Amino acid sequence: MRTKTILIIIITVIITIFLMMNTDAVQFDFIFIKKDISKLLVVGICTFAGFLLGYWAGRPRTVISTYDRNEDDSIPVHSPPVSKDALSDEDRDYIS
């Protein structure tokens, strides 16, 4: 097995043991309601939400650039290099 797979298994076992140790009911205060809820449920939901948010924040972004594509096939994306012989006399005077 690879190291990444072993690490994932170890983290999953640790989280499962932690969740099974915290199964007692605790009173949680919601905005208007007080409710007895199992710690297992709250910690499990928070762990899942943390992994989900971490994945969402850490995934690579897909960047679509309009500079990379040519919407009109008749226009070349890169213009051919211009040789010095193609310059007009006015352009040569400006450059020198």
Image: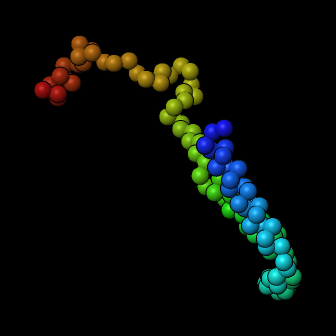
| Res 16 seen here | yes
The total number of labels drawn is 0
Q: Residue at x 73, y 56 (%)?
A: 13
Residue 36: image quadrant is bottom right
Please determine whether, in this image, residue 32 is positioned above or below residue 94: below
Query: In the depicted view, which residue is nearer to us: 43 or 92?
Result: 43
Residue 85: image quadrant is top left
Q: Which residue ends up furthest to the left in the rendered image?
A: 96
Q: Residue at x 70, y 50 (%)?
A: 9
Quadrant location of the N terminus?
top right
Q: Is residue 36 left or right of residue 19?
A: right
Query: In the depicted view, which residue is nearer to us: 65 or 53?
Result: 53
Residue 88: image quadrant is top left
Q: Position of residue 72 (x, y in %)?
A: 56, 25
Q: Residue at x 59, y 52 (%)?
A: 58
Picture colour scheme: rainbow
| Res 45 seen here | no
Query: In the depicted view, which residue is nearer to us: 64 or 78?
Result: 64
Q: Is residue 38 left or right of residue 64?
A: right
Q: Position of residue 57 (x, y in %)?
A: 61, 55
Query: In the depicted view, which residue is nearer to us: 38 or 10?
Result: 10
Quadrant location of the C terminus?
top left
Q: Position of residue 48 (x, y in %)?
A: 74, 60
Please determine whether, in this image, residue 17 is positioned above or below residue 76: below
Q: Position of residue 46 (x, y in %)?
A: 73, 67
Q: Residue at x 66, y 46 (%)?
A: 6
